[in-house]
Image (tube, grey):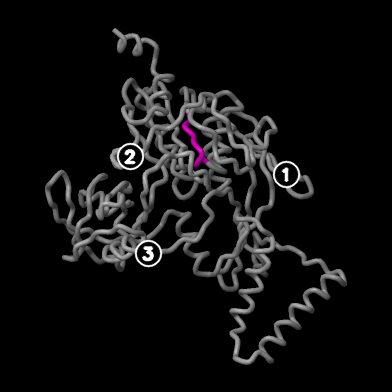
Amino acid sequence: MNSGSRKLITALICVFTLIAVAAVSVSVTNTVIAKNSGKTNTAYWNIPSSNDTNESFQRISEVYNILVSEYYVDLDSDTLIQGAIDGMFSAVDDPYTFYYTPEKMAATNADRLGLYVGIGVEVRIFGDGKIYVTRVFDGSPAQQAGVQRGDIIVSADGIQLGANTGEELTEAVSHIKGEQGTSVHIGISRANETLEMDVLRQSVISNRVEYRELENGILYIRLYDFFGDAVSGMQNAIAYAREHGLTGMIVDLRGNPGGQLDICINICDMFLDEGVIVYTLDRQQNRVDYTARNGKVDIPVAVLVNGETASASEIFAAALQDYGVATVIGTTTYGKGIVQTQYQFPTDGAGMQLTTSAYYTPKGVSIHKTGVTPDIVIEEAETTQQTLLEGPTLENDPQLKAAWEMLIPKEAENEDAA
């Protein structure tokens, strides 16, 4: 990730969940089931049967047998097989091509669905020993209990909490985690006041979309990634803009690492008329077009991007830019123009992910390693602890302010000037 694209102060982040997720930081993925004999929707592939290939597999078998029978101490066969698998993925030398153990596969699937057990908050540390709430998920137990963004969690079940490192944060969070249906008694510091509340640990859906109305009838929409409830979240945001007669929408993709291709296509379809959203080419140059069908939003749109806007979010920004239905504002995006396919093995739940194609914008441009260039280039402001806790506002965010100024009706702008 381009560390210079966002001048963030030192901060560590942890979401209150019961799973450890191993996933690439940026992605466009398709998911299939591999070698699921006797079932439908199965992806099969053929291993080449040339003599050279057969000899190579024979050598692997020979090496394995010699190791397990002749090495001076007993070797674990599962460890050797996993090592052989890991070696093949390492030889590919692609950071987006890797193997999932059954545990990691299950954790990744749960995370992409946005499901986990917890109280429903996101926290950061900033080096002052305190644990700050930077996000409260909609409908979560924490929201219902009254936890707010900017709160400091100081205790859990009578244990004083604090952290200066990632390890300490993980330890602190472990006191808030627990079994579904149990409660945790937490202490909150808010504006020099200490509050105490019981919060029920439940299954939580981490909402991928948040929105709020800005001045002069502009809707600000934050799209965190293209997983989980991103489609319904964006539908709700657009419905809100229409119902309230808003005159502009700002879609914030800054820091959005991507996600599932089908979710990205469905969201793009909300903004575009008929036409190609993106197309892919595989190693045989087979082309697959993904097209819009439903008709576009009739409200002016601005899209905010930065160096951490990647993959599926770049597809969205580039498609709207190519068709001229949105103005892209910010800094050049990450530049990941390749697509991964994810396979899951039904025998044990393990999986693998590999790069299977490259994608191109509606105008036939590859943004791989170059990124999407904004229509209006505006650098980000220095990010401070306070702005992270407050979230983006017209006062602390020059990119957001530029998008808002571009979208506000001219009569409102003139009234402000007067």
Residue 324, horizontal then vertical, whole percent: 57, 23
Q: Which residue is disc 1 drawn over? A: 281
Image quadrant in which the C terminus is located: top left
Position of 249 with respect to 40 (left or right) is left
Position of 120 with respect to 338 (left or right) is left
Check contact, mark 3 vs mark 2: CB within 8 A.
Answer: no
Q: Which residue is disc 3 drawn over? A: 18
Q: Which mark is residue 384?
A: 2
Identity of the amino acid at label 3?
A: Leu
Q: Quadrant of residue 372?
A: top right
- Measure the C-alpha gap from mark 3 to mark 1: 38 Å
Identity of the amino acid at label 2?
A: Thr
SS assignment at label 1 = strand
The magenta stretch is 303-309
Q: Earlier in the sequence, mark 3 or mark 1?
A: 3
Task: Assess whether residue 304 is covered by the magenta stretch.
Answer: yes
SS assignment at label 3 = loop
Identity of the amino acid at label 1?
A: Leu
Q: Earlier in the sequence, mark 1 or mark 2?
A: 1
Residue 409, horizontal then vertical, whole percent: 39, 15
Residue 64, horizontal then vertical, whole percent: 70, 82
- Measure the C-alpha gap from mark 3 to mark 2: 29 Å
Q: Earlier in the sequence, mark 3 or mark 2?
A: 3
Nearest to viewer (mark 1 / mark 2): 2
**In terms of depth relative to the viewer, which is nearer, 283 or 112?**
283
Nearest to viewer (mark 3 / mark 2): 2
Badge 2: residue crowd in 10 Å (few <14, some 14–19, many ≥20) = some
